[in-house]
Image (cartoon, grey):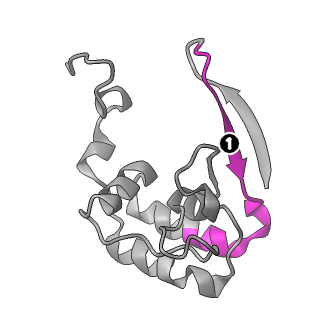
Amino acid sequence: MAASTSTAPAGGTKSFCLLTQDAASDPLNNNLRILWGETRAKCGSTKKAAREGELPPLPRSKVAGHVNDPMCLNWHVMDFCLDNCREKYDHVPYIEEELTDLKEWVSTSATRRAEDDLPRNRRYRRGGGRNK
């Protein structure tokens, strides 16, 4: 696992840590990433829809103490995630058999959401401003 730090665009002061898996050496995750890419879905809106009941819940983590909590979709399908992730506990390697449920979930439940097609600055209202 590697980490890199970045600064927010446009001179912002917020920094974050991007955690990555060694994807090049893991053909299993490459296959899952391809399956995910075919859906054209976005992780953030898909995870939100699963949390809010619009989609079936994500498969459960294998991590002790979190077996009733969801797997991290970003980590397993994109091979990276942010340091402040809600599912950071799940940023661990899985073997093929452990990813079977996630592959099934992606192939049957993950779809592109309408908000995925909105320009990034129109997806969410911030600071009480108006969406134009």
Picture coordinates of residue 59, whole percent (x, y): 46, 75
In the displayed structure image, the side of residue 70 where residue 30 appears, left or right = right
Secondary structure of residue under mark 1: strand
Total marks placed:
1
Q: Is residue 102 magenta?
A: no
Q: Give the range drawn in magenta.
A: 12-32
Q: Quadrant of the C terminus?
A: top left
The quadrant of the rendering that contains the N terminus is: bottom right
Residue at figure coordinates x 57%, y 79% from the top left: 99
17 in relation to 130, above or below: below
Hey, which residue is sitting farthest bottom in the picture?
Answer: 97
Nearer to the camera, 120 or 18: 18
Left or right of residue 44: residue 93: right
Whether residue 64 is visible: yes
Disc 1 residue crowd, few under 14, some 14–19, many 20+, Cα 10 Å: some
Specify whether residue 17 is painted magenta: yes
Residue 72 place in picture, x, y as percent: 54, 61
Q: Which residue is drawn at 48% across and 68% down?
A: 69
**Vertical side of 60 occupied by 9: above or below:** above
Q: Measured from the top left, where is residue 51 in percent x and y?
A: 34, 60
> Amino acid type of disc 1?
Leu
Q: In which quarter of the image is residue 6?
A: top right
Which residue is denoted by mark 1 in the rendering?
18
Q: In this view, does 67 lie above or below 43?
A: below
Furthest toward the front, the residue is 65
Horizontal arrangement in the rendering, residue 114 relative to residue 8 (left or right): left
Residue 41 appears in the figure: no
- In the rendering, at what x and y percent does residue 46 appear? 37, 57
Residue at horizontal 64 percent and vertical 75 percent from the top: 64
